[in-house]
């Protein structure tokens, strides 16, 4: 089966190249279409598709997989608990591979503006974002045995998701909480609820589907200046994509700092450092510790 999939991927590369060559010779596209460079196929994986001009880190437009590429692979699920940084992960994947990611969530217009594959939960994308079970309308995806699980320090996760939940801004993904509107009592209640959900959902996702293949990625490693390359290339290998060069991945990190995705609090907004009382931290940690420590999280390293 693996040899068959590898052969299909190689065939997809040849077909794509042949179509481009034919179009160039027939319609004279040399002057109007910038060619896309496909890194050679490695071990039957998808080639990372990047425009030639990426040598100077210009913006790239990721594309959907063609029918040959889609037929040669199963589409992994990009799963995380809300607030873990899934959108940032998707930007890194798209900008380092040249392929679009999809999602099971289709109602957020901001997400549709940022992610052109947002409405896809099928084999046309390289991975599908999900926070819970994949709905039935995503035909054939939920039974996929391949799941990439993104985790983040639970304390940071809960604050990020709480900020999104209570925000009334048009783009809640980057909205913070105004200092004069922050309610510690409400944050305490919601964060403890999230802690209970978190310890239930992380183990569940690593068991479902049975006999599944899982790849766990820590947000802190992915976002780290020194650890990021290893963390991201490990994920790309799991997604069956050839590893791009360090220069391409460095460019992807610069392009992934999208103003509609990356949250930077203003001077009028609260930060977790100033509003997290030690009593609440103790309560949260009492709930999440059995799971959090498996991934090297401690009660004190949430500040990193």
Image (cartoon, grey):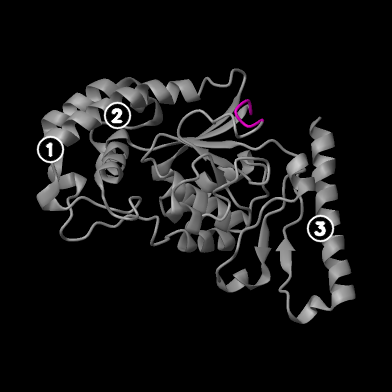
Q: Is residue 285 left or right of residue 126?
A: left
- Of mark 1 and mark 2, the one earlier in the sequence is 1
Q: Nearer the viewer, residue 298 or 73?
A: 73
Residue at 36% from the left image edge and 31% from the top image edge: 296
- Please provide the residue range marked out in magenta: 140-144
Residue at 67% from the left image edge and 55% from the top image edge: 48
In the rendered structure, are the residues bearing label 1 and label 2 in contact, judged by CB atoms less than 8 Å apart?
no
**Circle 3: is it few (<14), some (14-19), or many (20+) Cα within 10 Å?**
some
**Circle 2: is it few (<14), some (14-19), or many (20+) Cα within 10 Å?**
many
Residue at 85% from the left image edge and 76% from the top image edge: 27
Q: Which residue is mark 1?
A: 184
Give the image quarter of residue 190.
top left
Please determine whether, in this image, residue 124 is positioned above or below residue 61: above
Residue at 45% from the left image edge and 48% from the top image edge: 87
Q: Main secondary structure of the magenta part?
A: loop
- Of mark 2 and mark 3, the one earlier in the sequence is 3
Give SS at disc 2.
helix
Q: Which residue is mark 3?
A: 16
Q: Nearer the viewer, residue 83 or 148?
A: 83
x, y percentage for residue 148?
54, 35
């Amino acid at each position: 089966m693996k040899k068959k999939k590898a052969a299909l991927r190689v065939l997809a590369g040849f077909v794509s190249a042949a179509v481009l060559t034919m179009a160039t010779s027939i319609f004279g596209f040399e002057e109007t279409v910038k060619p896309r460079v496909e890194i050679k196929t490695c071990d039957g994986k998808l080639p990372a598709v990047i425009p030639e001009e990426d040598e100077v880190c210009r913006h790239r437009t990721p594309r959907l997989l063609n029918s040959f590429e889609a037929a040669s692979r199963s589409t992994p699920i990009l799963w995380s608990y809300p607030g873990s940084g899934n959108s940032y992960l998707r930007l890194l994947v798209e900008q380092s591979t040249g392929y679009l990611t999809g999602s099971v969530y289709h109602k957020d217009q901001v997400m549709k503006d940022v992610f052109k594959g947002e409405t896809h939960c099928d084999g046309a994308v390289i991975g599908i974002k999900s926070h819970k079970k994949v709905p039935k309308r995503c035909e054939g995806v939920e039974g996929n045995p391949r799941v990439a699980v993104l985790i983040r320090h639970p304390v940071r996760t809960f604050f990020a998701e709480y900020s999104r939940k209570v925000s009334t801004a048009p783009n809640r993904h980057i909205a913070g909480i105004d200092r004069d509107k922050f309610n510690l009592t409400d944050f305490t209640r919601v964060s403890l609820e999230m802690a209970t959900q978190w310890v239930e959902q992380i183990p569940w996702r690593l068991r479902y589907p049975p006999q599944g293949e899982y790849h766990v990625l820590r947000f802190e490693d992915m976002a780290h200046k020194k650890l990021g390359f290893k963390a991201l290339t490990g994920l790309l290998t799991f997604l069956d994509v050839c590893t791009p060069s360090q220069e391409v991945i460095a460019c992807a990190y610069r392009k992934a700092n999208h103003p509609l995705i990356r949250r930077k609090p203003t001077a009028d907004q609260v930060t977790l450092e100033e509003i997290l009382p030690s009593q609440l931290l103790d309560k949260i940690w009492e709930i999440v510790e059995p799971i959090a420590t498996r991934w090297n999280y401690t009660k004190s390293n949430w500040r990193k």
